[in-house]
Image (tube, grey):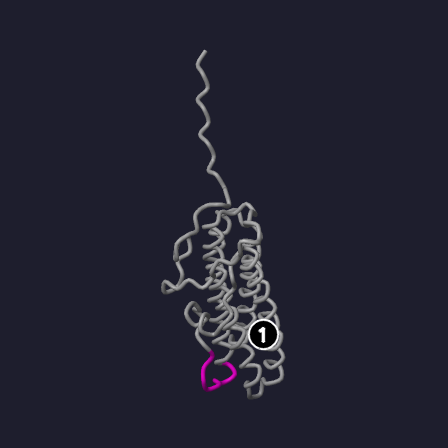
Amino acid sequence: MPKASPKSPKKSKSPITAAPAAGAGKVPAKGGTVVAHESGSRNAPIINIGIDRQDRAAIAEGLSRVLADTYTLYLTTHNFHWNVTGPHFNSLHAMFMNQYTELWGSTDVLAERIRALGHYAPGSYAEFSKIATVPDVPQNPPKAMEMVRILVKGHETVSRIAREFIPVAEEAGDDPTADMLTARCTVHDQTAWMLRSLLED
């Protein structure tokens, strides 16, 4: 009777792998800049949540880019809330307030997920400017409908960036991050649609 062939050993998911080099992992940092530096100390136990150290570094780097774009879009939306003018002032002023309030809350969720993965969350203008894809708010306030166009593009950009990193989180078995990014895409897609509707005849 033929013997059964031995099963090949599964890949170890040990949390005590060597620290990844800068730029290692599945997510290249924009412009080669690493902003989600690893946290921790000798007094704290090693993180052991079932996700490899290198995967956590890559996911944290991806989340940092989503955070930078979200924060930039938040600032732009808040600026437009202050500076919008014209016959649609009341409706746009209120709409922009709802949108920037939602964006502000989401930055905390993104940053705390980065921390849960064992990395420091970026939180300075200098860091955000290095990795953000969403452009900074125009220095001179544009007309109301141009503000709407800018926000449409901003929400679509954040949605695209977030979608890039969903497969990275899924491959690493990081369901909480994948679910969170999926939820963010839903918000940004819906907001872009609502804003775009204002521009249609």
Q: In front: 9, or 101?
A: 9
Question: What residue is drawn where x is 56% and y is 47%?
Answer: 48
Graded by Cα atoms within 10 Å as few (under 14), some (14 to 19) or many (20 or more), the crowding at tag 1 reads many
Q: Quadrant of residue 97?
A: bottom right
**Looking at the picture, does residue 115 appear above or below residue 15?**
below
- Percent across and percent down for residue 96 are 58, 77
140 part of magenta stretch: yes
- Whole-percent x, y for residue 103 in the image: 58, 70
Left or right position of 34 against 51: left
State the quadrant of the N terminus. Answer: top left
Q: Nearer the viewer, residue 41 or 188?
A: 41
* Image spot of residue 189 (x, y percent): 53, 64
Element type where label 1 sits in the image: helix
Specify whether residue 181 is painted magenta: no
Residue toward you, 14 or 83: 14
**Image point (43%, 68%), residue name:** 133
Q: Which residue occupies 59% across, 66% down?
A: 108
Total labels: the figure holds: 1
The residue that appears at 48% across and 71% down in the rendered structure is 154
Tell me where residue 29 sits by quadrant: bottom left
Instruction: Assign the magenta stretch its main secondary structure.
Output: loop
Outermost residue, left side: 31
Residue most extreme to the front: 43
Q: Which residue is mark 1?
A: 100
Residue 194, placed above or below residue 60: below
Relative image position of residue 119 (x, y in whole percent): 51, 59
Q: Which residues are magenta?
A: 137-145
Residue type pointed to by label 1 = Tyr
- Furthest-top residue in view? 1
